[in-house]
Amino acid sequence: MTRELSVIVLASLAGSSLGCGDDDGRAPVDAGTMPPDAGSDAGSAGTDAGPECDVGEAPIDPPALTGSFVFYGGDGGTGVPVPTGGDPTGIWAFDAATFYVPEDRRDQLDADASHAEGEAWLEVGATEFRLSFFFDVRLETLVVGTVRRPTTYLALGTYTADGPTLMFDAECLDGRMSGGMLMISFSESEGRGQLFIDVDSTDGGDPTVMVLDGTRTAL
């Protein structure tokens, strides 16, 4: 199987790790490799990265999140937004996710038929943060058929901001994230915000970029 779909199988979000940033300030995620049963409902595979993490009750009733897939680059692709920074403090409720997939993966993924659902919130104080992301990603691939992987991320700790980059020093992580330092880029304008996470290709190609869109519900 050429390139193993490892970059676009965001089912591999369940096997990914958030780590150091690229030159553009966005955070790369090692997308891992295709699971052997990727053509079936993969369920919620066991976690082995980081201790159990209790982030407490959600500070809000998060809205339903819907996710879509688009191609970027090349002749037929769209452009990827650029993080601009801003004020990250507050409680953020995310209602949309866009997965920007490199144009050269068009022969592997039916972007129009692929989607994601879930909920995601982020609370950022003066120095502390906590987050809870849940994604149920369903990909319609042109190689192995339907790939589905529910994935949960939980984290809390302290953070520092460097321009559009938020560096989260996590006291605990739960889900499939390894290491203690997370880097996520950010944009904020008039109470709307975006989080940017790069999903690196294991074959050296362009990354898939996950962009979460949300609203600041409180300061």
Image (cartoon, grey):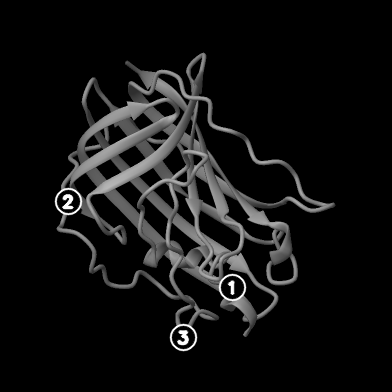
Task: Specify the quadrant of the image occupied by residue 211.
Answer: top right
Rate crowding at label 1 as few (under 14), some (14 to 19) or many (20 or more) other CA atoms within 10 Å.
many
- Place of residue 151 in the rendered image (x, y in percent of width and height, measured from the top left): 38, 60
Q: Is residue 139 above or below residue 73?
A: below
Disc 3 on helix, strand or loop? loop
**Mark number displayed over residue 36:** 3
Which mark is first along the chain, 1 or 3?
Answer: 1
Mark 1: amino acid: Leu
Q: Nearer the viewer's eye, disc 2 or disc 1?
A: 1
Residue identifier under label 2: 53
- Place of residue 186 in the rendered image (x, y in percent of width and height, measured from the top left): 46, 31
Q: How many numbered marks appear?
A: 3
Disc 1 on helix, strand or loop? helix
Which mark is first along the chain, 1 or 2?
Answer: 1
Residue identifier under label 1: 5
Disc 2 on helix, strand or loop? loop
- Place of residue 63 in the rendered image (x, y in percent of width and height, measured from the top left): 45, 36
From the viewer's perspective, is 139 left or right of 194? right
Report, in whole angstroms, how far the alpha carbon at label 3 lies from the one at label 2.
28 Å
